[in-house]
Amino acid sequence: PVNISGIVASSPTGAPVVVAIASATFPPATAHTIKIDTGVSNDTVSSTLTLLDPVTKHPISSSAINTDSSGNVNVNIYPVVGDIKISAPGYLVKIVRNINLALVNTLNISLIGGDINGDNIINSLDSSVMYTQWFSTNPADLNTSDLNNDGIINSLDWAILNKNWNKIGDN
């Protein structure tokens, strides 16, 4: 239950104001395993997992997640029908729609690398950022531009960006 207090509503004319508050009660969160595939072996991914209402698209819950080197992460998610959104630096947004989390305990999600500037499309803006970081080993640069996770930004990363050119993430 949610307790809301201190709401004050008024209208410029002094007429009565109706305030509608919608609330929802969710069953306890249950354990789920999410396998995130980036196409790179031994890749760990730091991302945000958001459970969205499938009708309104409003967030129900959100949490930061970090995969192990196999791409797995264990999370507790409400067992409801919803959309799962994964957002990770350097990757297009991925949304798995209308999934019944009461029936599914394991999700396999593939992320597409190359969205370096975070605008959810892989294009020349991403390559422009990558070029300014060419041969960098700076951890801040590696977070988004080191697409193959080898510790340096180079032609191997460009090949991944080029392979995914003009792809657009989910929204």
Image (cartoon, grey):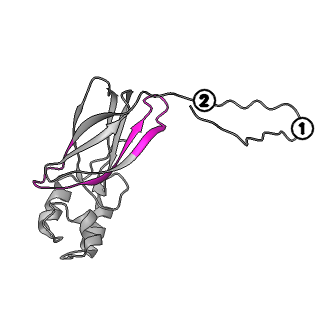
Q: Is residue 132 left or right of residue 152?
A: right
Residue 106, relative to residue 12: is it above or below?
above
Residue 136 in the image, given as x and y percentages of width and height: 21, 76
The image quadrant where one finds the N terminus is top right
What residue sits right under mark 1 in the picture? Answer: 13
Residue 38, relative to residue 152: is it above or below?
above
Residue 5 within the segment the image draws in magenta: no
The image quadrant where one finds the C terminus is top left
What is the residue that sits farthest to the right in this orientation? 13
- Magenta residue span: 35-62
Q: Which mark is residue 22?
A: 2
Residue 112, relative to residue 117: is it above or below?
above
Q: Which amino acid, mark 1?
A: Thr
Q: Secondary structure at mark 2?
A: loop
Q: Nearer the viewer, residue 112 or 31?
A: 31
Mark 1, other Cα within 10 Å: few <14 / some 14–19 / many ≥20: few
Distance in Å between CA atoms under marks 1 and 2: 26 Å
**What residue is at 32 percent from the left and 28 percent from the top?**
101
Q: Secondary structure at mark 1?
A: loop
Q: Which mark is residue 103?
A: none
**What residue is at 18 percent from the left and 70 percent from the top?**
153
Residue 94 in the image, given as x and y percentages of width and height: 30, 43
Residue 63, relative to residue 125: is it above or below?
above
**What residue is at 84 percent from the left and 30 percent from the top?**
16
Residue 122 in the image, given as x and y percentages of width and height: 28, 55
Q: Which amino acid, mark 2?
A: Ala
Number of numbered discs overlaid on the protein picture: 2
Tell which circle, 1 or 2, labels the residue nearer the N-terminal end: 1
Which label sits in the foreground, 1 or 2? Answer: 2
